[in-house]
Image (cartoon, grey):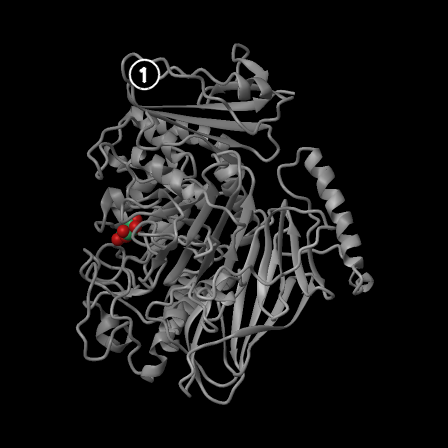
């Protein structure tokens, strides 16, 4: 992930490294002048032994830290890329009063709870002799092509910590994680192990943005000033959660807008319980500490064992929230998703859930597949209800054998039919769960997450299988592997429809029970990775009661995500707005479903539903048996239009021109292809009022000097359509007369020369 153009052989203690890095800066400066939106491939990780300082440069970002005289590792800089000649050395922090000791007011890179630390620690450890503090000091460090590695150790006990740093050469996104090692002879218990602490420059106008929600209402962007004290974003649910997402962005109220000003942002690659705490300490410094949630955490490390934290990625943009999310999208597509740097485009899919719920059978699914094929669908997905005694959510989970009443000859006839119609076949599974009314549970009641002799809480009539157990892990892999091996399946929708409760691990030493929080997630990752290895063409969607498991950890193993069970096309506009602050539209699935929507009983036109759903990966979830001729014709037209722009939508640059906040009658998004030859504008009107004339919508991100023809998205190019320069479309804008309630329209811009 990191490349370095620093020739290690020419490093010496007198600062030759700076000279080499200056060359790097020169290249970047000239690229900046040439207007490139992202950094060059010249990135570097540098160690300056004389001053014991470290520096990572990538994209337009410099991230630096160093060692104080007292041996504390502390942040020295994080922001716009600096000249290589700039000196960034760690100094003892200014002291305000003895009541706030150095350790608390120092911007430590990885503070242990000890030595008078009153702010959020990254690490907290309990030793068998009763010691519960850990005071980390710098031991050694090095920079190489993969980044920076720093060794820390406790001042008195055999606790070692290795910090890992990488930087992405294109986006300047820094990846940080830690390895905590018990180098002693007795077991120790880790009570808190964060991935990283991030320190922001001094400032008093910081605003925190986060994504919160609930089932059917995920992805609400919330913003608040960062005041003294702590703000905690977290999941205690064992998985990522619909309630809060492990992403943050911090901008400056006085300086930042959607398209300008500084934004620091980050996202955790972890699908278990997590926490990100944002603190403003007594001297006014803002720090973000995040990783696995310390709540109910307790990981016993035997002598010689170590614990690796997940990676916490973070970046900086000086182009506002829009610039920050474009960096994240680029990074996710290139460095996180399977198939990066060019992950496959999302095919148009059909999903049966809203049409049939559990009432799936061979005849009904074949009839839907025939209809789906006629409108241009490329992947047919059968959802819940095809296996075991699964006629409702009360039974069958865990029994992944085909229900012979519904599919007398197995899945083959349906799969062959779908393939014969020219579509891929996909199937819904929920491998981590079990209904107590299932053969699996009857055979293995001890396989679930539960506490000994305690009542168990069921959600959706189901319990969670304890994937941390090796036998359960192997069983789940074998079951899904068999399913995919025996049937010609191209895609799995991998669901996870409840959160944990009573998180115990039956049968292990109670001192090891809380390893569940780590081992479960690691085994989940292992199962999916192994499955993908055995079936390289298999694609997977992450779903968890809607958008409950979307994070950079699961995205490294899955190709797309289901953001919400709420498919109301108007609600989706604000959810998609929130979602794209953190995640690429290229993984964001959206279905066109029936009108009125079940969520709000709101009727909307087919075009409105399509244009809402075409802003990510497009799916159809309507009951096609109820469609009219006109619906089929409209859908065929819109799916064909989508295929013309999907590369731009899924892989291009997103500009949120008018955000769909509660107060805005209108919203608009704009997607520009990487080569700036194509762009697409989606615009929505919530409701007209008072015969208002709407202002022009101004494009963004086009090449000012190129000329673009603008046409309605579903109408072929013709000579009477306007052609203007990119400069014109961005300055004068587009006049889009819209009247009525829940109106939608879209335009394509194509470079003509
Ligand atoms: C969850 C998913 C839905 C659907 C159902 C099936 O709620 O989010 O899309 O798959 O499960 O039971």
Residue 460 on image: x %, y %: 20, 58
Question: Left or right: where does residue 718 sit relative to residue 513?
Answer: right
Front one among 82 and 221: 82
Q: Looking at the image, which residue sits at the far bottom?
A: 185
Residue, far right: 10
Report whether 682 appears left or right of 65: left
Residue at image mark 1: 739
Q: Is residue 487 visible?
A: no
Q: Residue at x 19, y 62 (%)?
A: 461
Q: Looking at the image, which residue is at 74% across and 48% down? A: 24
Instruction: Kindly identify the residue that appears in the image at 39 percent across and 60 percent down.
Output: 275
CA neighbours of label 1 inside 10 A, class few (<14), some (14 to 19), many (20+)? some
The spot of residue 592 in percent (x, y) is: 33, 36
Query: In this view, which residue lies farthest toward the front?
Result: 97
- Which image quarter is the N terminus in? bottom right
**Spot occupied by residue 148 in the image (x, y as percentages of width and height):** 64, 63
Q: Is residue 98 visible?
A: yes
Residue at (78%, 59%) from the top-left corner?
15
In the picture, measured across the screen, residue 89 lies left or right of residue 243, that is right
What is the x, y in percent for residue 236? 32, 62
Please determine whether, in this image, residue 26 is positioned above or below residue 389: above
Asked if the beta carbon under badge 1 is closer than 8 A to the nearest atom of ligand 1, the reply is no
Compared with 261, 386 (above or below) is below
Q: With respect to residue 714, does 365 lie above or below?
A: below
Label 1 SS: loop
Q: Locate the C terminus and report the quarter of the image it occupies.
A: top right
């Amino acid at each position: 992930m990191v490349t370095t153009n620093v020739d290690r052989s020419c490093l010496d203690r007198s600062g030759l490294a700076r000279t080499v890095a200056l060359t790097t800066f020169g290249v970047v400066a000239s690229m900046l002048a040439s207007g490139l939106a992202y950094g060059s491939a010249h990135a570097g990780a540098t160690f300056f032994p004389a001053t014991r300082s470290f520096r990572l440069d990538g994209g337009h970002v410099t991230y630096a830290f160093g060692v104080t005289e007292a041996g504390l590792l502390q942040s020295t800089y994080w922001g716009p890329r600096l000249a290589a000649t700039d000196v960034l050395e760690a100094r003892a922090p200014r002291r305000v009063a003895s009541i706030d000791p150095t350790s608390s007011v120092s911007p430590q890179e990885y503070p242990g709870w000890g030595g008078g630390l009153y702010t959020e620690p990254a690490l907290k450890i309990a030793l068998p002799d009763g010691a519960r503090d850990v005071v980390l000091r710098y031991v050694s460090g090095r920079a190489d092509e993969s980044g920076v590695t720093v060794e820390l150790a406790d001042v008195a006990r055999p606790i070692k910590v290795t910090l890992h740093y990488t930087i992405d050469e294109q986006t300047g996104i820094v990846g940080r994680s830690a390895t905590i090692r018990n180098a002693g002879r007795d077991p120790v218990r880790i009570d808190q192990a964060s991935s990283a602490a991030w320190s922001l420059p001094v400032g008093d106008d910081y605003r925190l943005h986060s994504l919160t929600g609930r089932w059917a209402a995920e992805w609400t962007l919330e913003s608040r000033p960062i005041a003294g004290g702590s703000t905690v974003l977290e999941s205690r649910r064992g998985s990522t959660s619909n309630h809060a997402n492990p992403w943050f962005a911090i901008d400056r109220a006085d300086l930042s807008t959607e398209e300008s000003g500084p934004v620091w942002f980050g996202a955790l690659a972890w699908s278990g319980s997590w926490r990100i705490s944002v603190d403003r300490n007594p001297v006014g410094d803002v720090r973000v500490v995040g990783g696995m949630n310390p709540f109910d955490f307790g990981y016993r490390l035997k002598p010689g064992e170590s614990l690796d934290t997940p990676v916490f990625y973070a970046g900086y943009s000086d182009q506002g929230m829009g610039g920050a999310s474009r960096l994240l999208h680029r990074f996710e597509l290139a460095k996180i998703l399977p198939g990066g740097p060019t992950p496959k485009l999302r095919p148009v899919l059909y999903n049966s859930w809203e049409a049939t719920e559990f009432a799936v059978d061979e005849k009904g699914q074949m009839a839907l597949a025939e209809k789906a094929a006629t409108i241009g669908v490329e992947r047919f997905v059968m959802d819940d209800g095809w296996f075991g005694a699964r006629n409702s959510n009360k039974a069958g989970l865990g029994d992944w054998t085909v229900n012979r009443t519904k599919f007398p000859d197995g899945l083959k006839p349906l799969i062959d039919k779908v393939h014969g119609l020219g579509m891929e076949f996909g199937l819904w599974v929920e491998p981590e769960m079990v209904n107590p009314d299932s053969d699996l549970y009857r055979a293995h009641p001890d396989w679930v997450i539960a506490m000994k002799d305690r009542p168990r809480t069921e959600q959706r009539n189901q319990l969670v299988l304890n994937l941390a157990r090796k036998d359960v892990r192997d069983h789940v892999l074998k079951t899904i592997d068999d399913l995919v091996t025996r049937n010609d399946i191209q895609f799995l929708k991998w669901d996870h429809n409840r959160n944990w409760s009573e998180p115990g691990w039956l049968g292990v030493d109670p001192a090891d029970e809380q390893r569940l929080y780590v081992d479960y997630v690691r085994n989940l990752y292992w199962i999916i990775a192994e499955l993908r290895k055995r079936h390289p063409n298999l694609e997977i969607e992450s779903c968890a009661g809607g958008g409950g498991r979307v994070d950079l950890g699961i995205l490294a193993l899955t190709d797309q995500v289901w953001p919400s069970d709420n498919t109301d096309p108007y609600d989706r506009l604000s959810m998609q707005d929130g979602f794209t602050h953190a995640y690429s539209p290229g993984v964001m699935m959206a279905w066109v479903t029936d009108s009125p929507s079940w969520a709000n009983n709101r009727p909307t036109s087919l075009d409105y539903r399509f244009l809402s759903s075409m802003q990510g990966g497009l799916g159809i979830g309507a009951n096609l048996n109820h469609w009219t001729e006109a619906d089929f014709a409209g859908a065929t037209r819109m799916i064909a239009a989508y295929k013309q722009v999907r590369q731009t939508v899924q892989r291009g640059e997103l500009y949120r021109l008018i955000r769909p906040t509660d107060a805005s009658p209108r919203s608009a998004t704009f997607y520009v292809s990487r080569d700036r030859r194509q762009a697409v504008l989606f615009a929505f009107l919530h409701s007209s009022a008072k015969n208002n004339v709407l202002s022009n919508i101004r494009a963004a991100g086009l090449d000012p000097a190129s000329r673009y023809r603008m046409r309605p998205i579903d109408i072929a190019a013709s000579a009477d359509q306007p052609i203007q320069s990119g400069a014109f479309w961005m300055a004068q804008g587009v006049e889009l007369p819209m009247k009525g309630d829940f109106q939608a329209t879209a335009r394509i811009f194509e470079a003509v020369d």
